Structure formats: C-alpha cells, structure tokens
Image (spheres, helix red, strand yellow):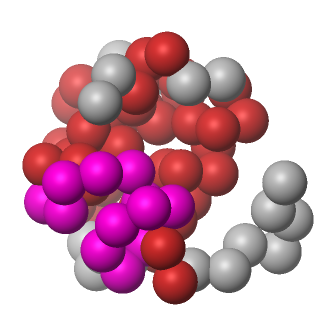
Amino acid sequence: MDASKLTLRQLQTESARALSTMEATNNNIYQFNKQAHHNSQNWYVAVIDWYVKQYGDLPSRAGPGKDIKLVYDD
C-alpha cells in the first residue's frame, strides 16, 4: 500500500480513522511529527503507514478503523 498515491481528501479521512483507534499520547503523536517536519500531507502518510503496519490495510478496510464513522464521509 502506497499512501502517497491517495488524494488529499483520502489521506485526511484515512488518517482520521487511524488516529481514532490509537491512544492519544504525546509519544504517539510525536512519532508522526518526527517524520513529517511540519508538512501535513507527510503527517497523514506517516499515520496511515503506521496503521497499515499494525493492521495490514487502510483504516477504511481493516482493523478497528473500518468501524469508525466520520461526521463527513464521502
């Protein structure tokens, strides 16, 4: 899975699903900040890559992310 090929909106929604499944701690968020260097698209990709490593596919397709309902979902 190459998250960098997703559209900006797909990056946003997939990363939102992924983040909803993890514990919100400084260390969890810092791991993504370290990879993104103040670039939001790289941050979304880092979150999605982490999730894919944990669950094997995009949050909308596998693991606990597939059960997350977003307020605005395409």
Q: Give the position of the N terminus as an image quadrant.
A: top left
Q: Residue at x 36, y 43 (%)?
A: 48
Of 34 and 48, nearer the camera is 48
Q: What is the number of callouts on the image?
A: 0
Residue 47, image x, y percentages:
34, 45
Residue 46 seen anywhere in this rendered image of the structure: yes
- Does the magenta run of residues contain 16? no
- Does the magenta run of residues contain 59? yes
> Looking at the image, is 29 positioned above or below residue 68?
above
> Looking at the image, is 47 positioned above or below residue 7?
below
> Looking at the image, is 39 positioned above or below residue 49?
above
Residue 27 seen anywhere in this rendered image of the structure: no
Residue 33, image x, y percentages:
31, 36
Residue 66, image x, y percentages:
48, 73
Residue 30, image x, y percentages:
24, 47
Of 42 and 56, nearer the camera is 56
Q: Does residue 7 appear left or right of residue 59 in this picture?
A: right
Q: Residue at x 40, y 27 (%)?
A: 3
In this view, the residue farthest toward the front is: 61
Q: Residue at x 57, y 36 (%)?
A: 11
Residue extent of the magenta highlight: 54-65
Q: Does residue 71 appear left or right of residue 37 in this picture?
A: right
Q: Give the position of the C terminus as an image quadrant.
A: bottom right
Q: Residue at x 64, y 51 (%)?
A: 13
